[in-house]
Image (cartoon, rainbow, N blue to C red):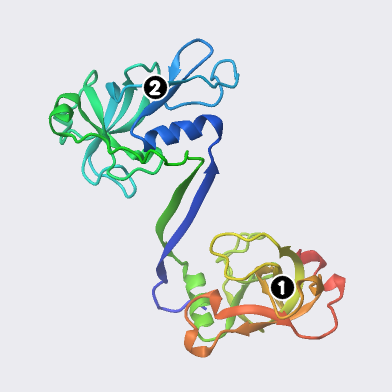
């Protein structure tokens, strides 16, 4: 049962590097940015779009007429960002602005570095401040600055190597940093894992046993207040064989990710099944948890490295058919 210890809390980071192949329109646009130039694309109505679009926003026709535009432009509208967030173009207050570059008919969104909101206005003439190092992405434009100050003090964009290859792909890192606070029931479950125990909770109305505990029964809607300690043996209810490699994968494919129904539980959870040929894993297979060394245990389900076959006869279908 829930003790007097405070709920657990820990940082939680999620990250993924999104890689995209650019194609015949975005590729030249990115290549030009790397080279310190900006390209637009002419639409079927003769308007020039910046940033480029692959298809006409009105007719849907594929577009291919690229047009070089100026790195000077005019602020169309803007808002002030007084406290920058992680990953934004500047680490100090700045303006987010829609800027129409000379030679373009549509504005692009970017940051303007003026130092204060009082120095910012609609109609302001601005100029690109190029990044010191460019790779072929929109971040090659570090920000915009007032056009008059730019001409006096901003360095020219460094030239790309004459033999540099065209940019054909772009990698966009996406990261989310947050702090997860576990519920009281989840905290008890995690503290039990640190002791090598699997702690579930039972609904007093329908008698179902949930692991990890939910705090409330999703069927009856009542609090689950009765703790239940479960064994580390169970049954494979469903599974898939992972054959596709991906970034951060700790096991070389092929391997099996399976839903395991612990003995005495009414809901299965996802874990790895190792210790046998992936082709031999099947529904109803009996498995047991393989725990990491005791000195590596903490308040995490990762204390169980994986599940492995017990060698027992397969469970009868009716024992897990309602828990798929």
Above or below residue 5? Residue 58 is: above
Calculate the distance from the C-alpha at mark 2 to the C-alpha at mark 1.
61 Å
Secondary structure at numbered mark 2: strand
Task: Determine crowd level at label 2: few under 14, some 14-19, many 20+ residues with C-alpha closer than 10 A.
Answer: some
Above or below residue 108? Residue 184 is: below
Residue depicted at 28% across the width and 21% down the height = 73
Secondary structure at numbered mark 1: strand
Task: Determine crowd level at label 1: few under 14, some 14-19, many 20+ residues with C-alpha closer than 10 A.
Answer: many
Give 115 or 290, whichever is nearer the viewer: 115
The residue identified by callout 2 is 68
Instruction: Name the residue furthest bottom.
Output: 294
Instruction: Name the residue furthest front.
Output: 163
The picture places residue 278, in percent across and down from the top left corner, at 76, 72
Can residue 263 be seen by looking at this rendering?
A: no
Q: Tell me which label, 2 or 1, sits earlier in the chain.
A: 2
The picture places residue 244, in percent across and down from the top left corner, at 67, 59
Give 131 or 177, whichever is nearer the viewer: 131
The residue identified by callout 1 is 261
Residue depicted at 64% across the width and 84% down the height = 290
Above or below residue 169? Residue 226 is: below
Above or below residue 14? Residue 190 is: below
Q: Quadrant of the C terminus?
A: bottom right
The answer to the question of whether label 2 and label 1 lie on touching residues, with beta carbons closer than 8 A, is no
Q: Nearer the viewer, mark 2 or mark 1?
A: 2
Label of residue 114 in the image: none
Quarter of the image for residue 92 reads top left
The picture places residue 214, in percent across and down from the top left corner, at 57, 66
Residue depicted at 24% across the width and 44% down the height = 83
Residue depicted at 53% across the width and 76% down the height = 189
The picture places residue 130, in percent across and down from the top left corner, at 28, 37
Number of labels in the image equals 2
């Amino acid at each position: 049962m829930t003790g007097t210890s405070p709920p657990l809390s820990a940082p939680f980071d999620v990250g993924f590097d999104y890689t995209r192949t650019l194609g015949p329109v975005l590729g030249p646009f990115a290549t030009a940015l790397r080279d310190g130039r900006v390209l637009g694309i002419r639409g079927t109505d003769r308007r020039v779009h910046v940033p480029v679009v692959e298809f006409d926003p009105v007719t849907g026709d594929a577009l291919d007429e690229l047009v070089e535009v100026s790195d000077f432009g005019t602020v169309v509208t803007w808002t002030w960002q007084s406290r920058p967030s992680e990953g934004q173009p500047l680490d100090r207050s700045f303006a987010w602005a829609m800027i129409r570059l000379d030679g373009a008919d549509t504005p692009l969104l970017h940051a303007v570095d003026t130092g204060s909101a009082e120095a910012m206005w609609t109609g302001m003439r601005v100029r690109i401040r190029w990044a010191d190092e460019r790779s072929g992405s929109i971040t090659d434009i570090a920000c915009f600055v007032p056009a008059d100050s730019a001409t006096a003090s901003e360095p020219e964009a460094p030239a790309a190597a004459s033999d540099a290859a065209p940019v054909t792909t772009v990698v966009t890192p996406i990261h989310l940093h947050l702090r997860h606070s576990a519920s009281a029931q989840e905290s008890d479950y995690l503290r039990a894992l640190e002791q090598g125990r699997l702690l579930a909770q039972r609904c007093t109305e329908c008698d179902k046993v949930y692991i990890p505990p939910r705090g409330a029964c999703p069927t009856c809607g009542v609090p689950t207040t009765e703790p239940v300690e479960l064994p580390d043996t169970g049954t494979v209810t469903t599974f898939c064989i992972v054959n596709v490699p991906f970034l951060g994968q700790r096991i070389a494919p092929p391997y099996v990710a399976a839903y395991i129904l612990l003995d005495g539980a009414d809901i299965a959870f996802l874990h790895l099944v190792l210790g046998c040929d992936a082709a031999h894993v099947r529904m109803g297979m009996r498995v047991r948890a393989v725990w990491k060394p005791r000195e590596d245990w903490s308040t995490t389900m990762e204390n169980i490295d994986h599940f492995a076959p017990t060698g027992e006869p397969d469970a009868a279908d009716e024992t897990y058919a309602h828990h798929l």
